Image: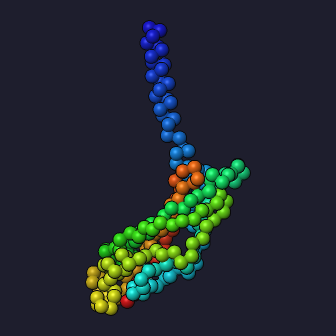
Amino acid sequence: MNKILQIAGLTLLLVVSGACESRTDKTDGGGVLLSVSDFDGLPIQVFVNLPVVQIESITIDNIVKDPAGSSSDLMNVEMESYQVTFARRDAGTRLPPAYTASIFGVAPAGGNVTYDNLPFMGSAQLTNPPLSDLLIQNGGFDKETGDQAIILDITMVFFGRTLTGDPVSTAPIRFTVEFVP
């Protein structure tokens, strides 16, 4: 009977210790948060004949979660990439493909990193439907809706890692752009 109690106690201990494995330090971003704090030169209307569409300036802050606690250089975030996705604001349903790009830079703990002339669209987005429909040589109108403009909601997310390897990303930021011939 004593052996059965020992085995039951050992089994309970293993179950409890296994349940503790999903600790918050696996998902807490290394004690920091990334936040897009400022962007300037955001276009509200874009001509589709441009080779690339960009934001004049965008700043990403590295915010220490516990400002009263200690921080270190290990909480610095090495920026890795960003992704841009699109949704139609108008009656159309066709979308440009997502835009993903690598970026470099370090957002120090409690500091920020700024990117100038950051593209959020490239030729793959501008030379494929639906935006390519707006090119003059293709008729200058959206073949799905018949409109001479396409309005897109644009969502951007930035990704990085702390120096200890913890993944961290910004909350999605959104803005709207009208594309015209």
Q: Nearer the viewer, residue 90 or 67?
A: 67
Above or below — where is 1 with respect to 168?
above
Q: Name the spot of residue 140 as percent of width and height, x first.
A: 32, 90
Q: Nearer the viewer, residue 134 or 56?
A: 56
Q: Name the spot of residue 104 as percent of width and height, x first.
A: 54, 65
- Which residue appears at 43% of the width and 76% of the height? 121
- Which residue appears at 54% of the width and 50% of the height? 165
- Which residue appears at 48% of the width and 14% of the height? 6
Q: Nearer the viewer, residue 146 or 156?
A: 156
Q: Quadrant of residue 149?
A: bottom left
Quadrant in which the N terminus is drawn: top left
Quadrant in which the C terminus is drawn: bottom left
For the question of whether residue 82 can be seen, the reply is no
Q: Name the spot of residue 170 as percent of width and height, x first.
A: 53, 61
Numbered marks: total: 0
Q: Name the spot of residue 72 as percent of width and height, x first.
A: 67, 52
Give the color scheme: rainbow, by chain, secondary structure or one colour.
rainbow
